[in-house]
Image: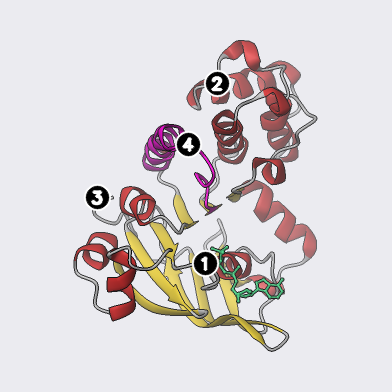
Amino acid sequence: MTNPIATDDAPLLVAEGLSKNYGARIGCRDVSLEIFPGEVLAVVGESGSGKSTLLGLLSTELAPSAGRVSYRLREGRLADLSTLGPAEKRLLMRTDWGFVRQNPAEGLRMAVSAGGNVGERLMAVGWRHYGQIREEASDWLGQVEIDADRIDDDPRAFSGGMRQRLQIARNLVTRPRLVFMDEPTGGLDVSVQARLLDLIRSLVAKMGLAVIIVTHDLAVARLLSHRMVVMRHGRVIETGLTDQVLDDPREPYTQLLVSSVLAA
Ligand SMILES: Nc1ncnc2c1ncn2[C@@H]1O[C@H](COP(=O)(O)OP(=O)(O)OP(=O)(O)O)[C@@H](O)[C@H]1O
């Protein structure tokens, strides 16, 4: 994405010296980064480079072996996430964060209707009025281009692309400030991917979301992100504005990645 980075001065999330070991194996090593409100950051690298591990650490799904993640709460305080209690963390995840997963079955409730998938997130943040919940869910299905007459169908009856669009609606309905995405277009046909990417791009811009997206696909990074980090062997080896890194990579490894010599 070529838009200037829409940042204000204070970072939304700050990672310092994050490391994760799996026994003797390194998942992620000494990663520090910041993300600002409204900024889309892509994490790229070949398979096994540590992208998913880093996303797991940033979203606190994984506990670091070393380092910490801090997040700016709505009240303005930058909080070390390891110091939040379980209730505070749950609230944060429900209200301020979203997580779009590659496999929709992990991000959706497959036996609950499409409307229910979106509506239950609203209920989790305190909505109580059935009619209003249904109306908001229906509005969101429209925003992700799912026909209104599918509201009572469950996602098992949806195509892969529709499931991903529903997952996006479920995540965005609470108007989060930060969304984690793990290969959101992975495993979809090229034409389905293109449509989904367009949708993600327009919603992210419209809502001013900060996004951390893991992808092995540099075209996805180019289209969606303002800034990117390149990972290799668990470390960040290059970081910069997306267009700069892709057009003029500094590191020989990134040059190989960009020239598609490496299967990312
Ligand atoms: N649960 C685990 N137990 C042991 N080792 C793990 C575990 N998860 C990841 N690893 C190892 O950590 C390293 C980084 O893996 P990770 O999944 O983060 O990479 P990735 O870049 O996301 O790869 P991919 O694109 O294939 O998903 C790899 O060497 C991997 O084998």
For marks 1 and 4, give the CA distance.
20 Å
Sooner in the amino-acid sequence: mark 1 or mark 3: 3
Q: Residue 47's mark?
A: 1
Query: Which tag is nearer the camera, tag 3 or tag 2?
Result: 2
Sooner in the amino-acid sequence: mark 4 or mark 3: 3
Residue at left 72%, top 28%?
156
Query: Which tag is nearer the camera, tag 1 or tag 3?
Result: 1
Residue at left 79%, top 63%?
86
Q: Is residue 78 visible?
A: no
Q: Are marks 1 and 3 in contact (CB under 8 Å)?
A: no
User: Where does residue 183 sit, x and y in percent of width and height?
Assistant: 52, 52
- Residue under label 4, please give it: 189
Query: Which tag is nearer the camera, tag 4 or tag 3?
Result: 4
Residue at left 65%, top 70%?
81
Local secondary structure at mark 1: loop
Q: Residue 3's mark?
A: 3
For marks 4 and 3, give the CA distance.
27 Å
Residue type highlighted by circle 4: Asp
Local secondary structure at mark 3: loop
Question: Which quadrant of the rendered structure holds the C terminus?
Answer: bottom left
Question: Disc 2 beta carbon < 8 A from ligand 1?
Answer: no
Residue type highlighted by circle 2: Ile
User: Where does residue 18 sit, x and y in percent of width and height?
Assistant: 56, 80
Sooner in the amino-acid sequence: mark 2 or mark 1: 1
- Residue under label 2, please give it: 146
